[in-house]
Amino acid sequence: MKKLFLYLMLVAPIFFSACEGSEEITGKFEFTIDGKAYTFPLATFVQRDGKTIVTTTDVSNTGTVVFNGIETGNYRLGLGANLPEALLNLNGIGSSTNNLFLYYKTEESDSAFFSLFGTLNVTEYSAEKVVGTFSGQGLTKATIMGGDTNAIISQVRPFSGSFTAKTVSTSK
């Protein structure tokens, strides 16, 4: 009986992976910041009060896209449509109305990278899955804390990425 159980444990993942790609089972989140690529083989999302939160983590690193919406379409990321507009709105970074891409290393909050401006294109949205691509320009929390506009402008970095996220059940 133990051998049968062990055999089924070994064969079952192969069977299920043959039916669907692993991305279809666990999701996937990939992005590049200033030429450095990050890939996470797991992505989840939760939808609450008209807002969608897509996230991934490997415990040491976390990537998140938050947007006000529950359907396919194009969304603006960040604080404005371009760099000058985003710089004028830096004080509003904590606003719950902002759509945002965020990446941070768990123990280095000052190195958190976030979108200043950009676009998000959600191509699939269902109760089970959200698929999208995003790109734009952003910078780190430490750069903003310096407060010097010229330093901020010189530290703006490009980002781009994509995700396929699977649902997470929550209860109110």
Image (cartoon, rainbow, N blue to C red):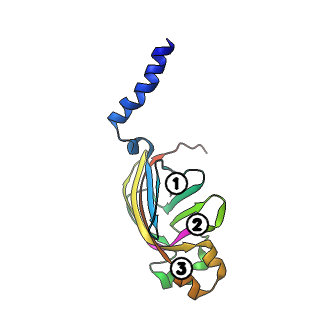
Nearer-N-terminus badge (2/1): 1
Badge 1 marks a residue whose secondary structure is strand
Badge 3 marks a residue whose secondary structure is loop
Disc 2 designates what residue? 96
Identity, as a three-letter code, of the amino acid under mark 1 = Thr
Disc 3 designates what residue? 155
Q: CA distance from mark 2 to mark 3?
A: 25 Å
Classify 2 as above or below 67: above
Would you say residue 154 is visible in this rendering? yes
Task: Please report the residue visible at 42 percent of the width from the left and 41 percent of the height from the top.
Answer: 25
Foreground label between 2 and 1: 1
Q: Is residue 116 magenta?
A: yes
Task: Please report the residue visible at 51 percent of the width from the left and 61 percent of the height from the top.
Answer: 66
Nearer-N-terminus badge (2/3): 2
Q: Position of residue 83 (x, y in %)?
A: 48, 82
For residue 55, which numbered disc appears in the image? 1
Would you say residue 119 is visible in this rendering? no
Badge 2 marks a residue whose secondary structure is loop
Q: CA distance from mark 2 to mark 1?
A: 17 Å
Highlighted range, magenta: 112-119
Q: What predominant SS class does the magenta segment belong to?
A: strand
Name the residue at the top extreme: 1
Of the pair 142 and 55, the residue shown nearer to us = 142
Foreground label between 2 and 3: 3
Within the image, what quadrant is residue 88 found in? Answer: bottom right
